[in-house]
Image: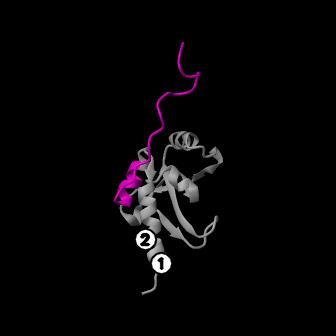
Amino acid sequence: MPSTRAGFSSVPPEIPRAFARRADGFRHAAAGGLWLAPLVYLERARYGPGWYGKVVSADPQRLLAWAISKGIPQRALQVKSLPDVDMPRATRRRLPGYHIDLWGARLALAYDPEMLARTRDRANTSPPPSIRTR
């Protein structure tokens, strides 16, 4: 007798990967992997000012499997094309892409807790990048 119900996999969803270079993250996502995009501080955002992140992929099923495993509803999936970073900027085409926004407590579902703490500490000692004064 199988240990999982029919239609369910016993393999856990992929863990989103962060990359030092955004272009590498876009390549990974365009190939169907899960990319953990860099955190950004937004002053005027849908859910108020704060740190926002996202998990990005060209594979909506893989992204949904990850989201469901974290208790994020399917309606959180958003469509947004990805740039083909291997083409010259002037003629760059867009590829099918999807993402799930993360903010507040949801950030801890994907981002390393120590990195989140360092980011918040940095924000408490200096203004976020978008509001820094020169």
Camera-nearest residue between 76 and 111 = 111
Residue 12 is inside the magenta segment = yes
- The mark that comes first in sequence, 1 or 2, is 2
- The residue drawn where x is 44% and y is 43% is 15
Looking at the image, which residue is at 59% across and 22% down?
Answer: 5
Near-viewer residue (113 or 63)? 113
Q: Main secondary structure of the magenta part?
A: loop
The residue positioned 53% from the left and 62% from the top of the image is: 52
- Estimate the spatial distance between the alpha carbons at disc 1 and disc 2, rounded to whole Å: 8 Å
Residue beneath disc 1: 127
Dot label at residue 122: 2
**Which residue ends up furthest to the top in the rendered image?**
1
Which three-letter amino acid code belongs to the residue tagged 1? Answer: Pro
Q: Which residues are magenta?
A: 1-28
The verdict on residue 11 being magenta is: yes
Rendered-image quadrant of the C terminus? bottom left
Q: Residues within 10 Å of mark 1 (few under 14, many from 20)?
A: few
Name the residue rendered at 47%, 67% in the picture. 120
The answer to whether residue 87 is seen in the rendering is: no
Q: Is residue 48 visible?
A: yes
